[in-house]
Amino acid sequence: VVDPTGLLLATIYGLYVGCVYISLAVGLNLIFGVMKVVNFAHGEVMILGAYITYTIWSALGLNPYIALLGSVAVITAVGMVLERLCFRPILGVGKLNEIFVSLGLIILLQNLMVRIWMTDPRRIISPYEFIYAFSYGVVRFPLDYTIVVVVTAAVLAGLSIFLKTTHFGRGLRATSQNRRAAMLMGVNVERADMISFGLGCALATIAGSFLGMASGFDPYAGVLPCIKAFAIIILGGLGSIPGAIVGGLMIGLAEGLTALIIGSGWRHAITFAVLIAVLVVKPTGIFGEAGE
Amino acid sequence: MFRRFVVSRKAVTKVQATIIAAVIIVAVVVGVAAWWVTRPLPPPPPPVPEAIRIGIVAPMTGVAADVGRDMWSCSVLASEEINEAGGVYVKEYDTKLPVRLFLGDTETSKEGGIRAVTKLITEDKVHILVGGFSSGITVADQVVASEHGMPWIITGASTPYVTHRTDIDVSMMFHHMATTDYYGRITANWLVDDLLPRLTEALGLPKDYKLRVSVIYQDTFYGVGAHEGFVAEVTEKGLPIDIVHEDKFPMGTTDFAPMLPAVAAVKPDAIYHAGFPKETASFIVQARRDFGINSLVATVECNNDVAFYEIIGKWGEGSVVMSTWSTYSIPRGATYDKIVAFKDRFYERWKTYPGMMGVRNYEGVLVAAKVIEMAGTLDPKAIVKALDELHIPEICEPREGGVIDYTEDFRELRPLEFADQTYFDPETGEARSRIVYPAELANPPGTELWLPDWYLEYLGG
């Protein structure tokens, strides 16, 4: 018999962690959608973002949500540099090259973070962590969760408006749909690549900083979330932002409910079983369409 | 006919006699000289080595690099102390030899561990090994040491298997730390001896009340061993503990949320969490902050670490680390002054404080030097014999009976663990700890286990 309180707690947490995964997965999808590049080092970019937020927060004593603005700016710039130096030279050369560049980046970024911050685990402590937006018995919704949900919703809404209403956003979408046609129509696809990579990294920074507030992290903590982000975008459909949102929530809730009903040892297995089941029924994912 | 050959006395002249005597003398001299030159010589005295070579097996890169750094820093401090005191007297050479450390970086991996131990033995030609962090890695790389008959003081692999295994010869390896099953057993006993009576009194529970405990452990040699030790102690001794929930997690987990609703559902009196600092601290924060699980968490000694106290913050209040070393406190008793001096020296040298694994390596290097002095030689068999016979006063960590000696059966130490309870220090804005059990080690003296109001409200409500 499933405990209803536990079910409610699992759902609340699933909503929160789903939001974190959505930020990560949407960033990954944005990069893939525009550049058709799979960046396996996205998890490490996420942890680098968490470290930058941690450093600004601990060194300057700023509110971590304010510090997050600084780290988003830094990592956006880092993302653009990575795109320019690592991915642009090999774009279109072959998928194997892209895979090995991003695998190399994993090692490079991990070692860089170990060099700077060592391997001691860290956590970003929010000033609101003792405040609950909603509380009834043991069922309570921390204010930080509310902020995460609101910020994620606001960022996604902002991204959607940017992509749909601005000239540059339309250029990104055009590049995503047909790179050659977009180029012929005067879209600067190289700039689109750089901006999408920077935006993707910024979203990873938001996810990493939220995760860094929820639990401890170290330079190697990006691997599992990145795998889950890949599962989410495959589940939702490669390149589909609504798919990433639905996929993120599905994975978050599937994990929480599996652990509650069957046991936490099964949560990854069930999550990937859901993924396989969806792909068998709809190979392009929930919102995915056949590629170019 | 024979007469012709008889030499008459008169026939030997004086000159002839002199010649014969000279020939005989020359022959004797030549014979003696030949014997002298060709006589079997005694073996030459062994060349005096430039130093005692101690190999430190530690993870200097990879996920446990912070632990490796601590192990190395403490080893360096120990070697400096030995050398400043003039070195180690080795009878075989009738001289004092300095100690020289060699580093073997395991890279926090089994393959790296095998490479590191092989390098220390075959290239650096060390005389003894000290260290070895992580049970999984040490189980892999001790095979190399076993093949070479290399004495090893193991300071950072808690599974008892490293000295219990029978598939390879481990008779030259000595376990210089508490073992995982001991972790579980000591915690089960502490829960019954210290927490249960206080809880019974505070909440007015019946005297035959059984403590309701949730056991959550890392799915590795370390966590499984702690879990098995806990369950075995409860079962074998019939302790008044009811294990109401059990779950395990992979190493490196920081998101415990999926398993926490199940813990919340059973509302345990206490949670035994066998994980590493990042894991246990994340668990405590999530359990209390996100799921309102205000149970008292007891955990394993490796959590007595600066990072653990940084991460848990105020959420860690009331948690207990069963330990032989305290980051922010010092057990009263015979080791008190030694620990104060050690911490001061360490701070002076490295401008930070030592961790538990480092302290064990500090002790390991000092023990290595001591047994070589006892053996009077660098011969590995003699060193192993000296380790077998070792019986010296405890150095930093408290030991049963106040001495360091290894058990005859599995060459293990007999540690004396204490309960180190966390409180929040508003001045530093971080968690700190006080030793609350047993009474003779409590610091400040008279400190007892504290049951926070939120804990009693949670259980009483």
Image (cartoon, coloured by chain):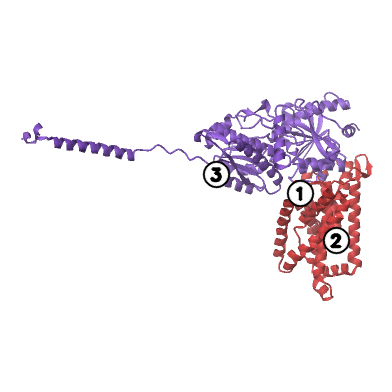
Chain colours: A red, B purple
Compared to A79, does B195 lie above or below? above
Q: Whole-Å distance between the Cαs marked 1 and 2? A: 28 Å
Q: Please tell me which residue lies in front, B431 or A143.
A: B431
| Furthest residue in direction top, as rendered | B207
Q: According to the image, label 1 marks what residue?
A: A218
Q: Residue B200, position in %: x, y?
A: 85, 26
Q: According to the image, label 2 marks what residue?
A: A241
Asked if residue B456 shows in the view, the reply is yes
Q: Residue B352, position in %: x, y?
A: 74, 41
Compared to A14, does B316 lie above or below? above
Asked if residue B205 shows in the view, the reply is no
The residue at 83%/33% (across/down) is: B269
Please state which amino acid type lies under the numbered disc 2: Ile
Q: In which chain is the residue bearing label 1? A: A
| Furthest residue in direction bottom, as rendered | A184
Q: Secondary structure at mark 2?
A: helix
Q: Quadrant of residue A174?
A: bottom right
Q: Secondary structure at mark 1?
A: loop
Q: Please tell me which residue lies in front, A171 or B200.
A: A171
The residue at 71%/57% (across/down) is: A108
Q: Residue A34, position in %: x, y?
A: 81, 66
Q: In which chain is the residue bearing label 3? A: B
Residue B125 is marked as: 3
